Image: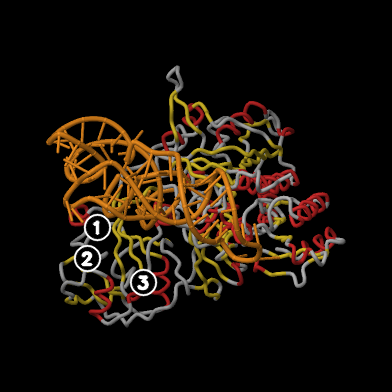
Amino acid sequence: MTRLSQLLLPTERQPPADAEAVSHQLMVRAGLVRQMGAGLWSWLPAGWRVHQKVVAIVREEMERIGAQEVLMPVLQPAELWKRTGRYDAIQGELFRLKDRKDADMVLAMTHEEAMTSHVAQIVRSYRDLPFSLFQFQVKERDEPRPRAGVLRTREFVMKDAYTFDRDEAGLQEHYERYREAYARVYDRSGLRWYEVESDTGMMGGKRAHEYMAPCAAGEDDVVLAGPDGASYSANVEVASADAQPIALPPAGETPVTIETPGTTTIAALAEHLDRPAGSLLKAFPVVVTPAPATVKGEVPAAKPRLVLVLLRGDHEVVEIKLEKALGGTVRQASEQEIRDRIGPPGFLGPIGSDVPVLLDAAAEATTEANDGGGWVVGANVVDQHLDGVVPGRDFAYEIADVRAVVAGDTVDGQPVTIEPAIEVGNIFQLMTRYSEPLGATFLDEEGKEQPIVMGSYGIGPARIAAAAVEQFHDEQGISWPKAIAPFDIEVVALGKQGTDEQLAAAKVYDELTAAGFDVLLDDRNGGAGQKLTDAELLGCPLRITVGKRSLAEGRVEAQIRRGQETIEGGLALDGLADAVRELWERIP
RNA sequence: CGGGGCGUAGCGCAGCCUGGUAGCGCACCGGCUUUGGGUGCCGGGGGUCGCCGGUUCGAAUCCGGCCGCCCCGACCA
């Protein structure tokens, strides 16, 4: 029996002063979670019910596709992580510690090492494959900046799953099955969501998708084309689209020097020349440090090198795309490096220096679309630029798509929009990134040793809960999707304990519970205002109010939380369970 | 890691500049009152003023160091 008078549900009238995100404010105010430290959160009973409901949905969908549930330690020997190279590759985010024997240990931020090393010991033959494992286990990440309540924390439960296949075809099959399972998970949980192409990041591997729930507190920007991203959707980190056209003035035989005193920014230059920023080439000098060896035995690459990135003045670089294109980590060049190798900052250009040039694909596409047109670039001389510069003719370059898509660009002719969203899950094709260093191999039909081909698949239940709050709330509080609400129905008993309303409400509670609903009964002695306000804050999908007014007619009141729709005339006590069941069908 | 801000009761805040033994609202406890949208009145409990050190007759207040938390950026499976 869940009586509010017995439930630890510390609702607050005011949100914590430091809570910025709506979900942060509401989840604390509604008594679902409490903070212990930066990025460290405790789940109180009602909040944990939400979390568990999400977990139950995920578990069902994992089992539906044949994945087997396991549980592996969070505290792990560092040795495993050294073998995959991540011990050195991951800088601050990995918690490291020593045990009493002074052995290096880590707190796992994900479980590729653990899963793979076990599987390496167990699997011998192609006959043992394929299969897939999953768990709900805590992950520890020393986040540089935890934020937004439960959205980005240092410790959180994750459903992580791993697939083990004989070859890439098997992985693809598994991958598709997971995509379907994920779609079901997010549909069932009641979120607005979409699947986008993503960067593979520290996981390594080949292909990856992220599952994004659009919301104001989102940390990622997602590029979408078509209705709700139907025809294109990708994280801006990897998105690519056709830039909006821009006209370039005809170029002469050779570049012409123009005086541009004091115009060190694109904006100033555009104004000075009275030309659109998109017709100017922005110079972005960077230093590339080749990626460190992530696998034992990999040959360390060359020394850091300077590269001049050129892109349209109305575009920005995406560091991740740049790093991919250049094959290493990238930082902006220092002023000294720029002066030594290229020219005076503010007037940089590709002509007159020996620094290799990387031209953004959108700039090249613009050049082609303006046959015979020329750009303005820095002259590498103070207060001078060059006009009528033609890439290829006037300077050599390599080409890559390294710019950020902006709203209004097009994909297959369709304009894109950009929305903030929170990542609620992801899937990666790891290939042999972990099986090789950890020796997870099998003998194929020919008796030849092969590395297992892997995939990894994560879901953050806490983020699903918080994203739901972000997406579904109003002035009064949360309005949960019914699949993950802490309770299906809150029965509010008006009047003091022992009154007719309270007795009738208890009966309503029993009847609805017997009918299979999760019911919360507010049997407190408080005033009507307090109870109704708290109910709206907590946000159960359906509220049944038992007061003496309607009770006199043998009825109770009903309100659907989403949209605060009051059911005309309420519901008759006689046959209440059936009426509620019917009503339940149309609640989101 | 860079920039900014904040630590005083469970939550939200004042007091600090100008040093004199800590206060308000909500919540909580007791009594009465009220009973369909946080009712009103009376009485009450609760705080190492983040921590350490210094200055001073005296420090929440001034000075130094440290710790914690939040926001922006960098970063982020």
Q: Quick check: do tags 3 and 2 share a chain?
A: yes
**Dot 3 lies on which element?**
loop
In which quadrant will I find the C terminus of chain A?
bottom right
Q: Which residue is mark 1?
A: A354
Q: Amino acid at mark 1?
A: Asp
In which quadrant will I find the N terminus of chain A?
top right
**Dot 1 lies on which element?**
loop
- Colour scheme of the picture: secondary structure
Q: Which residue is mark 2?
A: A346
Indicate the position of residue B74 as horizontal and vertical percent values.
Answer: 36, 52
| Of labels 3 and 1, the one closer to you | 3
Query: Badge 2 local density, few (<14 within 10 Å), some, or many (20+)?
Result: many
Kindly identify which numbered label has been placed on residue A112: none
Side of A455 relative to A295 (left or right): right
Kindly identify which numbered label has been placed on residue A314: 3
Side of A486 relative to A348 (left or right): right
Q: Quick check: do tags 3 and 1 share a chain?
A: yes
A42 vs A108, nearest the viewer = A42
Q: Amino acid at mark 2?
A: Gly
Q: Quick check: do tags 2 and 1 share a chain?
A: yes
- Mark 2 or mark 3, which is nearer the start of the sequence? 3
Q: Among all residues in the image, which is located at the extreme right?
A: A575
Indicate the position of residue A476 as horizontal and vertical percent values.
Answer: 57, 63
Above or below: residue A116 compared with residue A268: above
| Of labels 2 and 1, the one closer to you | 2
Above or below: residue B46 compared with residue A152: above
Can residue A86 be seen here? The reply is yes
Within the image, what quadrant is residue A332 found in? Answer: bottom left
Q: Residue at x 51, y 56 (%)?
A: A13
Can residue A91 be seen here? The reply is no
Chain of the residue displaying label 3: A
A393 vs A311, nearest the viewer = A311
